[in-house]
Amino acid sequence: MARVYISIGSNIDAENNVRLAVHALQQHYGKLILSSVYESEAVGFKGDNFLNLVAGLNTDEDVHTVADTLRKIEDDNGRDRSGPRFSARTVDLDLLLYDDLVVEEEGLQLPRDEITKNAFVLLPLEEIAPQLIHPLSGNTMCDHWLNFDKDSQKLWPVEFTF
């Protein structure tokens, strides 16, 4: 059984789309561990603020099946892939970690580099898995968050009901 972490984000009808994504993940994978929900400014483009969180789950699916499932959930929830890479989205599901697997291939990067680059990924991941070891750096998520430049990206927790 693999331990998987997924980043969930939206800035189009964000509350509704985050709920739909979490419910779809629960229907497919069962029990999830969910971080708090955070609001942050768009990174890489000008746009509405995002809502973000991280989900942890266990699965017997292989890594490519998980990636395909996430893409299908995005598509089922109106994800438009025709725009620029950094743009508004109904829902964005990024596979961050699949156990300690390291993969670099077309369409799949593990661990996802956003873990250490974006506060909206690192803080929620650190919240639910502080002692988790990053497969490349060898440091815990807690250590990465402690060393993160918190002035570089602002985010704040928001009240959220699933």
Image (cartoon, rainbow, N blue to C red):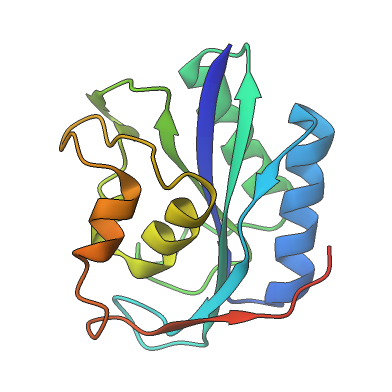
- Residue 155 appears left or right of 69: left
Q: Indicate the position of residue 97 as horizontal and vertical percent values.
A: 41, 34
Viewer-side residue, 64 vs 96: 96
Identify whether 76 is placed above or below 61.
below
Residue 33 horizontal side relative to residue 116, left or right:
right
Rendered-image quadrant of the C terminus: bottom right
Image quarter (top left, top right, bottom left or bottom right) of the N terminus: top right
Q: Looking at the picture, how far across and down is residue 143, in whole percent?
A: 25, 53
Q: Is residue 125 above or below residue 69?
A: below
**Residue 159 position by quadrant:** bottom right
Quick check: 65 above or below 67?
Answer: above
Which residue ends up furthest to the left in the rendered image? 137
Q: Nearer the viewer, residue 95 or 36?
A: 36
Q: Residue at x 33, y 81 (%)?
A: 45
**Closest to the observer: 112 or 57?**
57
Q: Measuring 18% from the left and 34% from the top, which residue is drawn there?
A: 138
Task: Please report the residue visible at 48 percent of the width from the left and 44 percent of the height from the top.
Answer: 129
**Numbered circles on residues, count:** 0
Measured from the top left, where is residue 87 in percent x and y? 42, 72
Is residue 64 found left or right of 55 in the rendered image?
A: left
Q: Residue at x 53, y 17 (%)?
A: 2
* Residue 160 horizontal/vertical position (percent): 76, 74
